[in-house]
Image (tube, grey):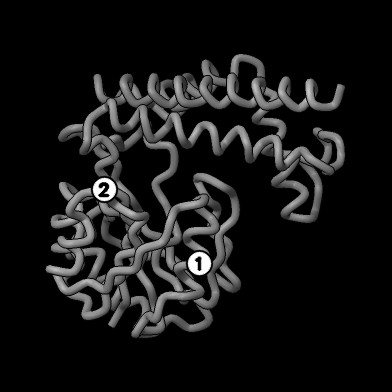
Amino acid sequence: MISVLILTRNEENNLPYCLASVKWSDDVHVLDSMSTDKTPAIATAAGAILTQRPFDNWASHQNWALQNLPFKHPWVFYLDADELATPELHSSMLAAIANPGDTVAFRVQRRDFLGNTWLRHVQTSPFYLRLFRPEKMRYERLVNPISIPDGSTGQVTGFLDHFPFSKGVGDWLSRHNTYSQLEAQQIVANRAGKAPFSLRSALFERDFHRRRYHQKELFYRLPARPLAKFFALYIAKRGFLDGRAGFTYATLQAIYEYMIVLKTRELDRAAQRCAC
């Protein structure tokens, strides 16, 4: 069997459907960030194990869950409340853990939806490490955390369906306003005490972590970065094939990127004033 981890914050509308999609597990954990709606009651009524913890940042919150929650089974499947596990995904996960070899984590393909439209082309990234041995997984970054497995990885078939606009565009913008602040803080933190940016290191550095730092700095230094992101999603990734939904999503992602740009500048100016 597989244990399940669901992170929540005021998800009374999404959580019942999410829980129904993982009813095959006898060990479902809901880590709730102090919801003020019916989320805790819905979780306990469905038989899930509820744990509440104030949210600090994504990596810290997720790492805490893996280190402290009493999972019953050796494998954990992680999803958010606005995501649904398809039956095909469940079957392929069972098959994968039946004979995992030295694999410690499996990638899952996620389908993002805007309304009834699958954002098949414009979606930023479709694969995520969501099935793993908890003692072999950790996360980095304040927001949009990077999964760092301690061992080899594989991939399962089936889909994890994601509905990021289930609460409306206004909620998406509100959440990404918070995310952009954390992204800006992460950019400033990455630069503190690090070596000056090097294009050579971004392309040829052998050490993975140093190369990743310089690659991120290369992206952060792109001129007209929000516009570049729009063209990357809508043109390079052929988001136009997703119709109106593809254009909407690419535009929202460009707005999100511009929010990060503005907030990073704001933090840099504040730091310069303090240094004077």
Mark 1 surroundings: few (<14), some (14-19) or many (≥20) residues within 10 A: some
* The N terminus sits in image quarter: bottom left
Image vertical order of residue 230 relative to residue 156, above or below: above
Considering the numbered disc 2 on the image, is that residue within a helix, a strand or a loop?
loop
Foreground pick, 108 / 147: 147
Badge 2: how crowded within 10 Å, few (<14), some, or many (20+)?
some
Seen at 25% across and 64% down, the residue is 89
Tell me residue 75's x, y (percent): 39, 78
Of mark 1 and mark 2, the one earlier in the sequence is 2
Three-letter amino acid code of the residue under disc 2: Asn
Q: Quadrant of residue 60?
A: bottom right
In the rendered structure, the answer to whether residue 38 lies left or right of residue 174 reads: left
Q: Residue at x 46, y 21 (%)?
A: 254
Residue 163, image x and y in percent?
Answer: 25, 42
Up-down relation of residue 235 to residue 77 (above or below): above
Quadrant for the C terminus in the image: top right
Numbered label attached to residue 64: 1
User: Are discs 1 and 2 less than 8 Å apart at CB?
Assistant: no
**Residue 30, how many percent across, how many down?**
30, 65
- Residue 269 versus residue 54 in the image, above or below: above
Where disc 1 sits, the SS reads: helix
Q: Which residue is mark 2?
A: 10
Which amino acid type is marked by label 1? Answer: Trp
